[in-house]
Image: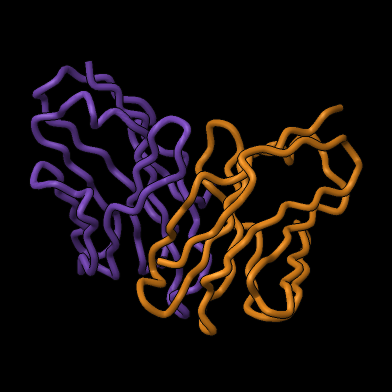
Amino acid sequence: DTGVSQDPRHKITKRGQNVTFRCDPISEHNRLYWYRQTLGQGPEFLTYFQNEAQLEKSRLLSDRFSAERPKGSFSTLEIQRTEQGDSAMYLCASSPRGAVYNEQFFGPGTRLTVL
Amino acid sequence: DAKTTQPNSMESNEEEPVHLPCNHSTISGTDYIHWYRQLPSQGPEYVIHGLTSNVNNRMASLAIAEDRKSSTLILHRATLRDAAVYYCILRGIQGAQKLVFGQGTRLTINP
């Protein structure tokens, strides 16, 4: 399967713990995005990378959140000192070079539950 | 970000056409109209997009009003697999790299 992959698919953690999620985009896609989706809502944009550069961050991305994309390949999203409000599905997407209107290909998501 | 308005839910029968409306009265001349859908327990997937002219692909058709203030996603023959939440999204020059999702329309297909 050559789609976007995310790991883990599910994560249960206790409040105050740190968690890290990984996203592997489609090979040679230079753009990578993170979104968060809470129950019953549409996904909300968190951050965007072009190659290894983080070009945009949403105000939703508090100081406890950090994302990286070393070498412009896979990306990680870390949440420090998790809170119950962080419980959500975290979605990663990638898109190829070319027009910014190119379609985004989404992974299956990582569901985070903070107890 | 320009806003879109969609019905919360719609219902249709299998093998019948489905017309999903979207209003975007504040659309600007350079905004593209994109549709994504999200099947249960999956990430969203691209369906179709257009600017001014109607568009067709293997999944659906997109009909865009002449004034561009509304559009309709058309599924020509719905199957049970088309049951999903459908999102109508405007992508303009500013911030085009991110998708701004609304609530979408939850489509139920009856067998």
Which quadrant: the N terminus of chain B? bottom left
Q: Is residue A88 left or right of residue B86?
A: left
**Which residue is depicted at the point 86% across and 53% down?**
B76
Q: Label the purple chain with its letter.
A: A
Image coordinates for residue A65, horizontal then vertical, percent: 15, 44
**Which residue is depicted at the point 53% across and 37% down?**
B42
Q: Is residue A75 left or right of residue B36?
A: left
**Which residue is depicted at the point 69% across and 65% down?**
B71
**Which residue is depicted at the point 43% across and 30% down?**
A39
Q: Nearer the viewer, residue B103 or A88?
A: B103
Image coordinates for residue B31, horizontal then vertical, percent: 52, 76
Q: Is residue A106 left or right of residue A31?
A: right
Q: Residue furthest bottom?
A: B29
Image coordinates for residue B10, horizontal then vertical, percent: 72, 39
Q: Label the orange chain with its letter.
A: B
Image coordinates for residue B12, horizontal then vertical, percent: 82, 37
